[in-house]
Amino acid sequence: MSSKGLVERLKDGGTLVVAEGYLLEFERRGYLKGGGFVPEVVIEHPDLIRVMHEEFVHAGSDVVEAFTYYAHREKLRSIGREGDLETLNKTAIKIAREVADKTGTLMAGDICVTGVYSADHKETHDTTRKMFIEQVQWAVEGGCDYIIAETFGYLGEALLALEVIKEYGKGIPAVVTLTAFHPDVTLDKVRFPEACRKLELAGAAVVGLNCTRGPSTMLPLLKEIRKVCKGPIAALPVPMTTTDECRTMYSLKDPQTGQLMYPENINTFICNRKDVRAFAEEAKAIGVQYIGLCCGNAANLTRELADVYGKNPKAMRYAPDMTQNIMIGEAAENISKEGALVKKYSLGLFSKEELNALYEGADKESK
């Protein structure tokens, strides 16, 4: 295990970069079915889970998060694999622990929104609680350093998850994050800053927001959360270009047809590295200590966060240096006259007169 735990690392302004987004990334790679998003890949291709953990650590993640998101009883029941529940969870936790030990990073267990909880139906609370208990116990048995409880639309469900972690987690700290839909209140009608403060007061080591919103529509809420919360806050948006008109990834639309793009075509809105870097810089200025990206994340985007947060990951060795590019970089002109010509063609740096002359020459050659 890591020599320093979650609380110690965040003490006195310390920071953590945390890579999430496994569901959409495995769907993109063709190993996970979109829609239900159940992480069957853990059982069917465990080697790929290990590789993705290592990839994200290489990019600068300080944490290996066990891929048990949506690996709860209700989700597996929905696809007829409830019998694989324990095997899936224990396999994911074992892989995460091994990678964390190998890389000197923290290992986090994970529980999430159940789809069962309803604020108005008390009978759902007991069902939800039982689902949390079994996953928390497996995470603790597997040696997690802390537990993530995430993407809750209901504050009540988030508080219930925290209660279970406190009761069954044997002192392991909890990071609890809400997901912000639209408008800026939870499904049980609590403003997000107040909801985060309630979670903090209830004993969460870190509170904040994850998933659903992109950087531009999450940042305003983060500023308000930072004002009322006393301890570390978390920010893990989807790296997508959400707007005031479309605040969540679910509401993003094709500009030509108006059709919703989630989930099959959501890659159209993925942020570029410059966008992610700008988000990291603003989040750091706000005082976000626990930062990451959720659905849509990739290693090159995590590397941007890690660089801004001073982690100096191994992947920085391969950060782009376009001055060496033979098509558009300085190297094109430095290498040869031919390189300068290629650069001019690749960037279209011709005057109207030069273009006319080129086309006239091309016409003559074709005759």
Image: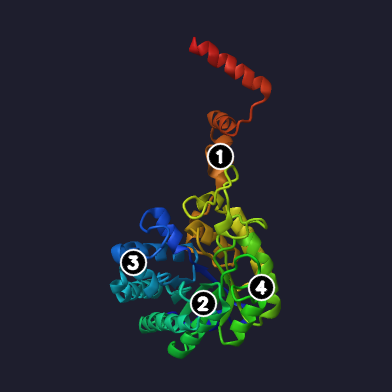
User: In which quadrant will I find the N terminus?
Assistant: bottom left
Indicate which label's residue lies in the foreground, 1 or 3: 3
| Vertical arrangement, residue 79 with respect to residue 341, above or below | below
Q: Which of disc 2 and disc 1 is earlier in sequence?
A: 2
Q: Which residue is mark 2?
A: 118
Distance CA(mark 1)–CA(mark 2):
61 Å
Distance CA(mark 1)–CA(mark 3):
45 Å
- Element type at marker 2? loop
> Mark 1 belongs to which amino acid?
Ala
Residue at the far top in the pictured view? 367
Distance CA(mark 4)–CA(mark 2):
33 Å
Q: For this view, does 223 lie left or right of residue 173?
A: right
Instruction: Judge the density around disc 2: few (<14), some (14-19), many (≥20) Cα neighbours within 10 Å.
Output: some
Q: Which residue is mark 1?
A: 331
> Mark 2 belongs to which amino acid?
Ser
Q: For this view, does 305 lie left or right of residue 71?
A: right
Q: Residue at x 44, y 84 (%)?
A: 126
Where in the figure is residue 186, as x and y percent of width and height? 61, 73
Q: Which mark is drawn over residue 42?
A: 3
Indicate the quadrant where residue 196 lies.
bottom right
